[in-house]
Image: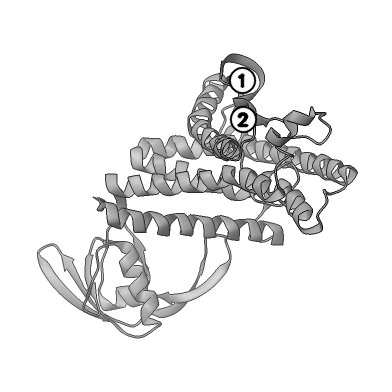
Amino acid sequence: MFIYKALYFIIIAVVVLGPLIFVHELGHFIFAKLFGVKVETFSLGFGRKLIGKKIGETEYILSLLPLGGYVKMLGDSPDVELAEEEIPRSFLGKAPIKRIVIVAAGPIFNIIFAYLIFVVSFMIGVPVPTAHIGDVMKGSPAEIAGLKTNDLILSVNNKAMDSWVDFTESIAEANGRPLAIKAKRGDQILSFNITPAVGTTDDIFGEKVSRPMIGVSMSNIKKTVSYSLQDSIVNGGKEALGASTLIVKSIQKLIEGKVPLSSIGSPILIAKVAGDRAKEGLVSFLWIVGFVSINLGLLNFLPIPILDGGHIVFYGWEMIFRKPMNIRVREIGQQLGLIFLISLMVLAIYNDLIRFIFKRGFMP
């Protein structure tokens, strides 16, 4: 049982992360080529080469460990000795600003790729929670007014409600003022006047927040809504921005200690969530791939040596001070960065083993 579960996780992780890694490395590759840098190797995966083919001056290879990849450029390390005629085509032979663009292109491509995924998803059709009432809390303003489970909210203050999001936004916008609600119950159209009460609930980070509430929850009823290309372009941008904001806030809360370290996940978590979303349909699966792609892009911008963000810091220093950062300082920074990333990955894998395997009885 454990072996099958492990294989399942590996396959899903490769299916999700493989294209994202390819897109990331493609960003580095394209801009290196545009700036005239010789790309020696384009690899999907790390470790021993499985297959490869040289086209022009670049060898394209598939390596043993699939959860990663790299683009090997001529002279991308300061300790490599180059002939005089090779320097103009080397990575470090280019101006710092060009090196920054090449490095930044990887995570930027991940964010663009996620945006395109969201646009396509909106065009295909996304599942949207309807404005049906789920549970009604006892003693709440909604129960006192007479709202019941499965009532469909038609309008709030004469504004039509097309989804649960519309409904919750209308409650928030009223800021505690009375709501004139029309709802459908069977064949009946009913009217309710409800004044929200200020309640306390947990936000997505587990922190207590106060907001106007009428005491109802969302139902499980959903509808699929397809959008035009124009609307999909706009909605895709909003979704990409919302996902980016959520990820940045999550990192901030993690640093502040308001989000526990146990929430950090590895590719095992990605595989689990992606596998669950795949069962819900193509769009749900694409949605999680888009979210992971943005996550990959933004995390790579963190100013940690080894990551793209750390290299951007090094080249930014060189651009500002007109000289490269001390090699010894860079080496120490990269060693510390590597230790940090390995520690983070060990923690993430440990969390996921506890979360998905030991606690759920997958181990024999």
User: In x, y percent, where is residue 235?
Assistant: 36, 57
Between 78 and 186, the one nearer to me in the picture: 78
Residue 220 in percent (x, y) is at 31, 52
Q: Which residue is mark 2?
A: 69
Q: Nearer the viewer, residue 71 or 274?
A: 71
In-image side of 159 versus 39 (left or right): left
Tally the marks. 2
Question: What amino acid is at disc 2?
Answer: Gly
Q: Are marks 1 and 2 in contact (CB under 8 Å)?
A: yes
CA–CA distance in space, label 1 to label 2: 8 Å
Asked which secondary structure carries label 1, the reply is strand
Q: Residue furthest bottom?
A: 177
Q: Amino acid at mark 1?
A: Ser
Q: Is residue 96 above or below residue 192?
A: above
Image position of 355 with respect to 100: above or below: above
Which residue is rendered at x = 32% and y = 50% of the image?
A: 122
Left or right: 13 as drawn, with respect to 69: left
Of 62 and 182, the residue lying toward us: 62
Secondary structure beneath disc 2? Answer: strand
Residue 23 seen by the camera: yes
Q: Quadrant of the C terminus?
A: top right
Dot placed on the residue nearer the N-terminal end, 1 or 2: 1
- Residue at image point 34% right, 46% down: 121
Q: Residues within 10 Å of mark 1 (few under 14, many from 20)?
A: some
Q: Position of residue 113 (x, y in %)?
A: 46, 44
149 displayed left or right of 212:
left
User: Dividing the picture into quarters, in which one does residue 130 lie?
Assistant: bottom left
Question: Measured along the vertical axis of the image, is residue 3 above or below residue 109?
Answer: above
On residue 199, the disc is none
Residue for badge 1: 63
Residue 135 appears in view: no
- Residue drawn at x 68%, y 49% as measured from the top left: 309
